[in-house]
Image: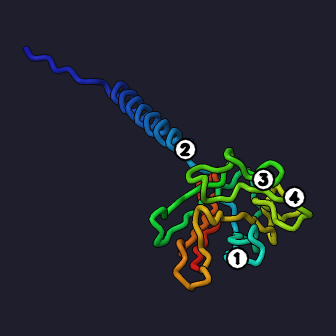
Amino acid sequence: MRTSRAVSPVISVILMIAIVVILVATASVFMFDSGLGVDEPAPNIADTTGEFVVDDPSPLSNQIVQITHRGGDNVAVEELKIIVRASGPDSDLPREARLVNLPAEGSSIDEKNIEGSDELIDESHNPIGGVYPPNLLITSQDTNVWSATGTIQFRISTGGADFRIEDNNTDPEADTLEVIIVHTPSNAIISEHAFTP
């Protein structure tokens, strides 16, 4: 005599529900866990303009970089990282430096504000009579916020990368300067300029 065994319909429904619950739980853990790594959204910077003043009659005003915020969201200066790259025919180039830990104390950049080549960004500060600009200047109503019409200004050291054309009209040591401003919480580029003076 043969007996046949079968799982009753109630048990099979319970087994199917248990399998579905386990699959949903596994999928949700994976999805929620991967969502934790999403960066916050980048600020909307509508436009920036840049200027690189290479040759100025005042020696400490040579090679001034100015990046001006033309419109869009305000950005906390402490959330910015500025990447600076100089390249050209000189054998010591290319060089790259990053301005970090901003804003710099008292508008004076020092070693804690520079990563990479410490020769590229000028660290000197000569406030004699206010004639020379500080080596980091943020012109906004609040210097801790880069807002519309505000300018970030710093100086490229001529010893690190010299973009000036000498009197004998020889080619300069450096010919391209890239300035990239990154919003660090979102890791997004919010301004990018390449200067070829």
Instruction: Please state if 151 lies on the left or on the right of 51 as rendered.
Output: right
Q: Amino acid at mark 4?
A: Asp
Disc 2 packing (10 Å; few <14; some 14–19; many ≥20): few
Give whichever of discs 1 and 3 has the lower sequence position: 1
Residue to which mark 4 is pinned: 142
Q: Which of the pair 101/85 is nearer the observer?
A: 85
Most extreme residue toward the top, as rendered? 1
Name the front one of labels 3 and 2.
3
Distance (Cα) linking label 1 and label 2: 41 Å
Q: Residue at x 60, y 80 (%)?
A: 165
Residue to which mark 3 is pinned: 108
Q: Secondary structure at mark 1?
A: strand
Distance (Cα) linking label 4 and label 2: 31 Å
Instruction: Please state if 196 lies on the left or on the right of 154 as rendered.
Output: left
Distance (Cα) linking label 3 and label 2: 35 Å
Residue to which mark 2 is pinned: 37
Q: Tell me where residue 83 appears, x and y as whole percent.
A: 60, 59
Q: Residue at x 70, y 52 (%)?
A: 79
Name the front one of labels 4 and 1.
1
Name the front one of labels 3 and 4.
3
- Determine if residue 69 is in view: no
Give whichever of discs 4 and 2 has the lower sequence position: 2
Residue to which mark 1 is pinned: 53
Q: Which of the pair 128/19 is nearer the observer?
A: 128
Give whichever of discs 3 and 4 has the lower sequence position: 3
Quadrant location, the N terminus = top left
Q: Tell me where residue 17 appears, x and y as whole percent.
A: 41, 32
Evaluate if marks 1 and 3 touch, with contact meaning CB atoms under 8 Å apart.
Answer: no
